Image (cartoon, coloured by chain):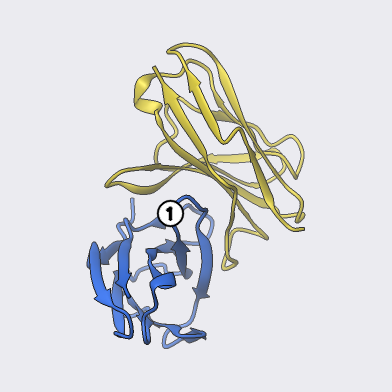
Amino acid sequence: EAQVTQNPRYLITVTGKKLTVTCSQNMNHEYMSWYRQDPGLGLRQIYYSMNVEVTDKGDVPEGYKVSRKEKRNFPLILESPSPNQTSLYFCASSVTGGNEKLFFGSGTQLSVL
Amino acid sequence: ILNVEQSPQSLHVQEGDSTNFTCSFPSSNFYALHWYRWETAKSPEALFVMTLNGDEKKKGRISATLNTKEGYSYLYIKGSQPEDSATYLCARNQAGTALIFGKGTTLSVSS
């Protein structure tokens, strides 16, 4: 089944404790992206990747890192999480990032205490 | 940042009513306009991706139109059903850059 797999679904952590949210797609998509959803703000893009080893900042990249060492995986890394990073996170992918639809993962609800 | 505005923010209709929402966006350097349907506790799912001025797309009772020259798109739902209750997101894509989402229109359909 074609899908974007995102883990974990829920995560509670403490300020400063490094964490990684994984994202993997099995559709051979070139484009992958991370979004965060906050009440009243809509989906905001954190980082995106047009292909392996190519990553670019979105609207809200501060406090996040990503890597794209292989096509299928695009992990989101929070080196030192802070409470303002408490949010609902989505990973998404598409064929090339142009005029193709995005496929979303199931979301990760992160709480930073 | 390229602003994508959606209106109304929310609306409530009765089963069987037809309704429509608006997505407004900057018309310069337009590449594509996306519509997504997002049900509570689920992930957003694509409805349409439109690229050409005058595009019209249809999926069952849902249809969308696109005007790239004036920078707007309409999403129509004919004969709303309770299962149409969701947040509808539009997003604008400029080639080679981020996909910018609006804040969405939340539709509630009562039976």
Q: Colour of chain A?
A: yellow
x, y percentage for residue A46? 47, 39
Q: Position of residue B96 (x, y in %)?
A: 54, 56
B17 in relation to A81, above or below: below
Packing grade of label 1 (10 A; few <14, some 14-19, many >=20) is few
Q: Nearer the viewer, residue B28 or B98?
A: B98
- Give the residue pinned by disc 1: B40
Q: How many marks?
A: 1
The vertical placement of B94 against B79, above or below, is above
Q: Is residue A102 left or right of residue B22?
A: right
Residue B14: image location, x then y, percent: 27, 78
Is residue B10 visible in this depiction of the protein?
yes
> From this viewpoint, is residue B25 visible?
no
Q: Which chain is blue?
A: B
Left or right: residue A95 compared with residue B52: right
Residue at image point 30% right, 57% down:
B3
- Is A27 positioned to the left or the right of A54 in the image? right
**Nearer the observer, A61 or B69:** A61
Height in image: B68 above or below A55?
A: below
At horizontal 36% and vertical 80% (from top left) the residue drawn is B80
Protein chain holding label 1: B
Q: Quadrant of residue B61?
A: bottom left
Q: Identify the residue at horizontal 37%, vertical 86% (top origin).
A: B79
Q: Amino acid at mark 1?
A: Thr
Q: Is disc 1 placed on a helix, strand or loop?
A: loop
Residue A5 lies in quadrant: top right
